Amino acid sequence: MVIKYMPLSFRFGNKDVRIIVDCIQLPIQKPSSPTEQQLTSSPYKNTNILKGMIGITPNGAISFISPLYCGIISDKQLLIKSELMDCLESNDVS
């Protein structure tokens, strides 16, 4: 049933895709605490950020939103902490 609502580009080459995942970075106001500044600092964005992960279905519906974490967390650590892998079924491929 999911295939029926997929865009054509997914329907033919990627019909087994169930979720598309990406990390998001949300800029925040600079914290007053030096420790919190350090934890949320992004050397790439030159600002303070929180990071999260979002998952959408191939037809564009949001299917997963992780909690937000300090900006210094790596994408790999974020994936592990988000527990998204625990939501997948045994026959899903990552």
Image: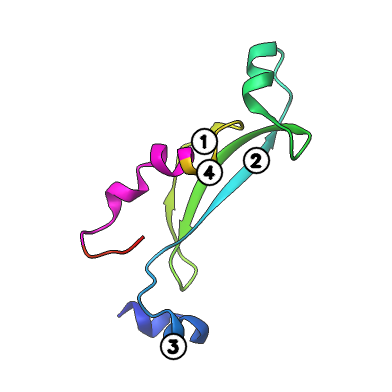
For label 2, the SS is strand
- Stretch of the chain drawn in magenta: 77-90
Q: Which residue is mark 3?
A: 12
Quadrant containing the C terminus is: bottom left
Name the mark nearer the viewer: 2 or 3.
3
Query: Residue at (50%, 68%) from the top-left corner?
Result: 60
Alpha-carbon span between mark 3 and mark 1: 34 Å
Residue ranking furthest to the left: 90
Q: Is residue 83 magenta?
A: yes
N-terminal label among 3 and 1: 3
Q: In the image, residue 93 lies at what x, y percent? A: 32, 64
Query: Residue at (49%, 52%) from the top-left corner?
Result: 54
Is there CB contact under 8 Å for labels 4 and 1? Answer: no
Residue 68, which numbered label?
1
Query: Residue at (44%, 44%) from the top-left corner?
Result: 79
Mark 1 is on which residue type?
Leu
Is there CB contact under 8 Å for labels 1 and 2? Answer: yes
Mark 3 is on which residue type?
Phe
